[in-house]
Amino acid sequence: KLINKKKLYGKYTSGYFIDIGVKRNLLKFKKDYRKLFEKPAIFLDRDGVVNEDFGYVSSKRKFKPKEKVLKLLDKKYSNYYKFIVTNQSGIGRGYYTISHFIRFQQWINELLLKKYNVLISDTKFCPHHPKFAKKKYKIKCECRKPNNMMIKELFETCCIIKKKSLFVGDKLSDFLCAKKSNIQFLSPTQFLKT
């Protein structure tokens, strides 16, 4: 049913495969997994990098992909993990909910895979703002860029080659986050020249 609804995708590969249902193979996989899956990552701000930034983009109608960036991600950076790392104070301000953001981001991820062959490995987002958010979201946090907690979490949970990784962002907060994370920063214009 999921295949017919185009909700499930598959890809033929001649790469590594191991059946971890066998204890001997599971132990081998635990020993080898890091070198098998380790690769560089591209950390992408969303609004202004992946799509045009019209302010608090939260609907299909407002979503306009940045075609050149997405085509380059597919063409030149296909062997990189791709992560979206985005401040989403629209949640904290009450413009949309976390569940709405998650559904919308899933739609974006499906579109990027189907139309541009760009697989987003994970999305990290910060709903907080220290001044303009409401109630529990009105805090000074460690996840909101320019802080780099979102990047740190990805480094802790994913097999990323840090020295070859990039951060593509369009704001000073993105630049500072990349600097704190000790990874190379590129603006969208610089990225398109790579």
Image (tube, rainbow, N blue to C red):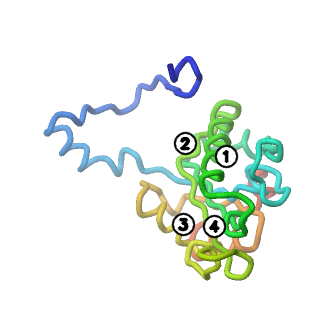
Q: Amino acid at mark 3?
A: Met
The residues tagged by marks 3 and 4 sit, at their Cα atoms, a distance apart of: 12 Å
| Residue type for callout 2 | Asn
Question: Which residue is disc 1 drawn over?
Answer: 104
- 86 over 33 or under it: above or below: below
For image coordinates 47% across by 22% down, the residue present is 12
Which residue is pictured at 61% across the width and 81% down the height? Answer: 139
CA gap, disc 1 to disc 2?
A: 26 Å
Label 2, label 4: how far apart the Cα atoms are? 30 Å
Q: Which residue is mark 4?
A: 127
| Tag 2 residue | 79
Quick one: label 2 or label 3, which is nearer the N terminus?
2
Q: CA distance from mark 1 to mark 3?
A: 19 Å
In this view, the residue farthest toward the left is 24
Query: Measuring 64% from the left and 78% from the top, which residue is drawn there?
Result: 138
* Label located before the other in sequence (1 or 3): 1
Q: Which numbered disc flags the more N-terminal residue, 3 or 4?
A: 4
**Residue topped by disc 3:** 150
Q: Nearer the viewer, mark 1 or mark 3?
A: 1
Q: Which mark is residue 37?
A: none
